[in-house]
Amino acid sequence: MALAASEGDVCLPLAQLAQDEAIACTADVLRANLLESGVAVLAAPLPPRDCAHPLVLDADDRLYLRRFFDLEQRLAAALVTRARAPAQAVPPTLRTTLDKLFKPRTTPGPDWQKLAVALALQGRLTVISGGPGTGKTTTVAALLACLLELTPTLRIALAAPTGKAAARMLEALRARAADLPAKLRKRLPAEAHTLHRLLGVTPVAGRFRHHAGNPLAVDVLVVDEASMLDLALATRVLDALPPDARLILLGDKDQLAAVEAGAVFAELSAARVFSAHTLEQLALLTGTPAQALADLPTPATSTALADSVVWLTESHRFRHDSGIGRLAANINAGEGTEALAWLRGGEDASARWIDDEGARPSEATLNAMEAGYAPYLAALRAPAVDAQARAAAAFAAFDRFRVLVAVHEGGRGLVALNAHLERVLRAALDLPPERGPGHAWLGRPVIVLRNDALLGLYNGDIGLCLPDDSGMLMVFFPQPGGSYRCIAPLRLPAHDTAFALTVHKSQGSEFEEVLLVLPAKPVRVLTRELLYTGVTRAARQVTLAGPARVFAAGCGLRTVRLSGLAARMSAQP
Ligand SMILES: Nc1ncnc2c1ncn2[C@@H]1O[C@H](COP(=O)(O)OP(=O)(O)OP(=O)(O)O)[C@@H](O)[C@H]1O
């Protein structure tokens, strides 16, 4: 079970477990043995309160670690309670506001951004799924404008699983809110938090200061990059949210799931289903012709998350047929061979392919890696007025490009590519030979691997080693408001070099250009979701380097996360 959890699964179906070579018996025999031995207890529908069994078996023969069963049960109940909360009346005056915020469309079809706002105005749980640039943040800016118009004193919190994602969200929200009246803009939050910081980290792992007994003082919580939410964190967020607060989850259902167990966002946003009554209300509020909504699924029996899920599918950042959009669509559809045909033909400069089959990256791949960081090298060499100005220039140059990888080890993995780029940069800057792994040197980018609440650093934060105004090498981290704070290298929690990042660690970030280096052989972690997430980190240009068969195999491989969340939500009384 622990192995399954480490691969992201929340539970294991008994039938699958029974096929394991080490177990080799029927599911019936396995069930009887587990229950008789006292290792597992039946959930009917919940396990008895005071039992000490480490495993729980549910009515559909899913076997859980006790902790995961409790979390999943709690999360399902909390989500369904929120989704079923009676619809809130929306004053008709908001129709005028919505019309002002969303100009009539020039393209056919309903305006899903406007519909998403109308839906979120009525409910306490709204899940908005969309690929890059589909207007999720713009939608939230409009929603907050409507809510603030109704309640000027509304307490809004913005959060994301990583510091980078939180900072991007705040920046994007400010930009999207630029057209709002100044009195509303002023009331938007000035900060976005990591979820850990919002919930309040305590010295006890997994315990937060805010929970059901000490809820967050918020009326609306917006969580961006929600596909990175694992089961445990999602449960803590729901626990800490006051019952009448609104929760808005933004994410991309096609992206990689969290590193830890669970694929909460993908499960929540898998289907969008509306009741006939809600569609009627939405049509009224948004002025959408009922005909335009007629094709939407309206099941006879309501589903757990009916009227809570919206998909945004139109990218405003790049056209569907532009290189990055087209490649992302091919990957999502499992069309690796089709993608390779046009990538190899060099049809679109925004998506490039380097045929590279060796155990180590070819000359062409290494050249692309080094060329990508040439502007960063130039920024490190350039004179600067002061340390803050140098940090701003260095971050701007560093953040425009990133090397992404699927695996840690091997000649094409994270460690090897970081080592290569370190050697190249040190040679170019005439730095003395390495003094061993982990020390500071001018220009070293670092990624934080552990939360350190005291220092205010969180897993995934990225800093750059640069001189401070006294010439001492420090690690600079961006902070809200655009300035940089610096921390002595020796004080940093566990960290690593960050020229190359795993695709997992790149979630929540976006770069002008991305070079995605694939491994030499197909591996289990190289899935459709990983390729999609990697490719969609690029805003302007993506280059893939690897063997064609590895890319094609990855497009054909879907991530399967075993979980019972959807079933448990449907089973809620
Ligand atoms: N309805 C629209 N019409 C035209 N442009 C739009 C529309 N909605 C959003 N945009 C523009 O598209 C770009 C992306 O919008 P936005 O940041 O809201 O998308 P997102 O889904 O939050 O993106 P991300 O992938 O960064 O999370 C922005 O430049 C925004 O101004």
Image (cartoon, rainbow, N blue to C red):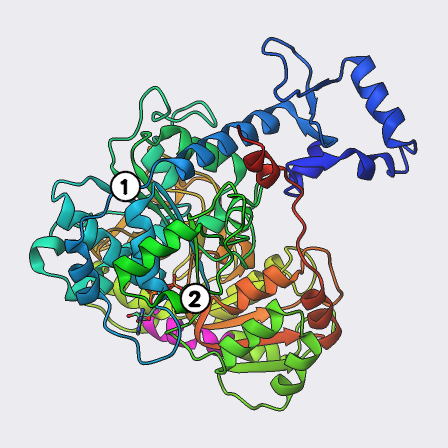
Q: Is residue 106 magenta?
A: no
Give the position of the N terminus as an image quadrant. Answer: top right
Q: In which of the image's four quarters is ligand 1 placed?
A: bottom left
Q: Main secondary structure of the magenta part?
A: helix
Sequence order check: which comes first, mark 1 or mark 2? 1
Disc 1 within 8 angstroms of ligand 1 (CB): no
Residue drawn 71% across the image and 61% down it: 557
Residue at (18, 49) in percent of width and height: 91
Answer few, some or many: residues within 10 Å of disc 2's Cα (few below 14, many 20 plus, some between 14 and 19).
Answer: many
Is residue 371 magenta-colored?
yes
- Residue 88 shows which numbered tag? 1
**Callout 1 amino acid:** Gln
Q: Percent position (x, y) of residue 564?
A: 63, 37
For mark 1, does the 10 Å Cα neighbourhood hold few (<14), some (14 to 19), or many (20 or more) residues? few
Is 130 above or below relative to 314?
above
Per the rendered image, the range of residues in magenta is 370-380
Q: Which residue is mark 2?
A: 132
